Amino acid sequence: EDLFCYPPNNLCLLEKLMGEELRIKQLFGANLGVAAPVWEAALHLCRYFEDQSVELRGRRVIELGAGTGVVGILAARLGAEMTITDLPLALPQLRANVSANVPPAGWPSAPPAVLPLCWGEDHLAFPSDWDLVLCADIVYLPETYPLLVETLAHLCKNGAVVYLSSKMRREHRTQSFYKEHLQSRFDVELVLRDDKQNNNIYRASKRAEE
Ligand SMILES: C[S@@+](CC[C@H](N)C(=O)[O-])C[C@H]1O[C@@H](n2cnc3c(N)ncnc32)[C@H](O)[C@@H]1O
């Protein structure tokens, strides 16, 4: 996979994402664990936006568990009003990547905000007025599945759309998140399946409360 780089290169140049040349640092060695690399699911989501011409310009968008920030940074470069979130330990990497990717003419909307958001803990500090919520490879810890649904339900205003890109790992019961947890409060649609990489992209919207 030409876009995907691992150590020893800590700098990932992503030149082919929607015509944008991103410089993404992956801070391996900083004890970031799974937050350090760019995961395939993130690249799948970026390509889906490109293929489907998903309109990001002028939309209020929040990303959860952003890791390196590649998805949110790309969305901000394409005009989204972007808030990029992760656990506190990942924020220095996210801030470094946001700073390294300021477009030559400046951010088309505001510069992306980088903020801590631990699912099920910090979500109430955020408003419920997003147009889009983005999630790439964040469905892998079964104990967080109820917290993730609670967080998504809080963030979604009426009509908000959530895009989730997931490597469908059996050992993490990823499928059960979509089929049981998310479907309890959201209408969930599988919009793209990559068999070779076992990656699914879902679009979800919150059902009206009964
Ligand atoms: C597999 S990585 C995916 C990173 C990035 N979205 C990507 O696709 O390249 C999972 C991310 O979820 C974050 N994460 C894990 N548990 C979390 C929690 N309880 N609250 C918020 N973020 C969490 C990790 O810090 C990490 O950045």
Image: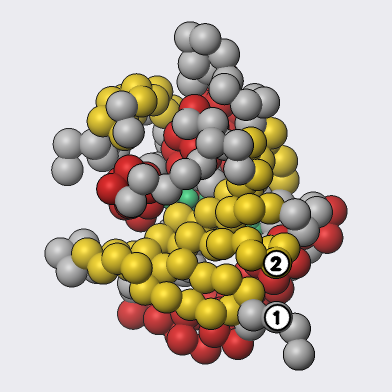
Q: What element does badge 1 sit on?
A: loop
Answer above or below: position of 149 versus 80.
Answer: below
Label 2 to label 1: alpha-carbon separation = 8 Å
Q: Farthest residue in the top direction?
A: 104
- Badge 2 crowding class, 10 Å Cα cut-off, few under 14, some 14 to 19, many 20 or more, is some
Q: For the C terminus, which image quadrant? A: bottom right
Answer above or below: position of 102 versus 41.
Answer: above
Mark 1 and mark 2 in contact (Cβ < 8 Å)?
A: yes
Q: Position of residue 145 (x, y in %)?
A: 59, 76
> Which quadrant of the structure image shows residue 46?
top left
In the displayed structure, does residue 195 sit left or right of residue 112?
left
Badge number at residue 158: 2
Which residue is rendered at x = 68% and y = 53% of the image? 130
Q: Position of residue 85 (x, y in %)?
A: 64, 46
Q: Looking at the image, which is closer to me, 76 or 94?
A: 76
- Badge 1 crowding class, 10 Å Cα cut-off, few under 14, some 14 to 19, many 20 or more, is few
Residue identified by numbered label 1 = 208
